[in-house]
Image (cartoon, rainbow, N blue to C red):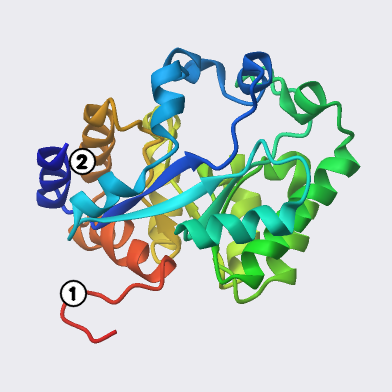
Amino acid sequence: MLSVFRGLERKGLAGFEALVFGEIPSERETIFAMVPGAYHKYITPQVLENQKDPFTVIKQAAPFKIIPFADARFVRSDAHQKVQRFKERGFQGIKLLYIPEEEVELQIGGMEKAFGRSVRESEAITALLIDGASSHGMLVLFHADLRKYGGFVEEMVRSHPKTNFNIPHFGSSRKLMSVLMDRYSNCYTDVSSLPPFMQRDPASYRDFVTDYQDRILFGSDGVLIRPEEIESALEFLRNFLDEDEVFDKLVRRNFLRFHHLPEEGTST
């Protein structure tokens, strides 16, 4: 594993976020209802067991920066207390998979199916999780489709101006994502899972990345047991972009800024 981290460093990557389930239901059907169908094959007993202690690997990776995020998609109650425990364990951010209703394309049953929750109830628990993260100085990775839930997402970003948010996958809408980034300096996005779309329409995606090059992060949606997926996503992005400086921003400089880390050669 250490050779993987060294290899990613050589390709220009400053680090990545490790998304670890902060809470895991005992019912496998609940887990599968909140995990995209493409990832069901990775949900094995050993993988779930490995989620319990990510910090040993994180320490071994140094000086490569792995930022642990507690994936809070399964949290159903006591949001503030659980976020506090995540912070005490060493997590520096939370990951929210905000899918209150079924997403057929992603093969996700959603919170309504998994927990029997209404959209309004899902909004309430998500808002509490974000409020808890913000109060503890934690970052928020907030997966949400802006076409459906953009109003709620904007309310969360606006209400927590000192908290950095990453709305991944361009929020499923470059147009709506650009509005958020224009309005809120604490709002970022990433390119995870987007290469197929970028290949189909390279000119417009390249223009978008160029226009928002200071707010876009590299992302792969890769898993550590398949490091070649991360490397492949890195190579795609390097070949896709016209300028080395823009690539450096996405894979290094923006990562450091988003996570409040100093650039190499600067003081803390």
Front-lying residue, 21 or 12: 21
Q: Residue at x 28, y 47 (%)?
A: 56
Q: What residue sits right under mark 1 in the picture?
A: 264
Q: Is 218 drawn above or below residue 80 in the view shown?
A: above
Q: Quadrant of the N terminus?
A: top left
Q: Is 151 drawn above or below residue 107 in the view shown?
A: below
- Mark 1 neighbour density, 10 Å: few (under 14) some (14–19) many (20 or more): few
Q: Quadrant of the C terminus?
A: bottom left
- Mark 2 neighbour density, 10 Å: few (under 14) some (14–19) many (20 or more): few
Q: CA distance from mark 1 to mark 2?
A: 25 Å
x, y percent for residue 165: 57, 60
Q: Is residue 195 visible?
A: yes
Q: Nearer the viewer, mark 1 or mark 2?
A: 1
**Tag 1–tag 2 contact (CB < 8 Å):** no
Q: Amino acid at mark 1?
A: Glu
Q: Identify the mark at residue 239; answer none if there is no mark.
A: 2
x, y percent for residue 3: 9, 39
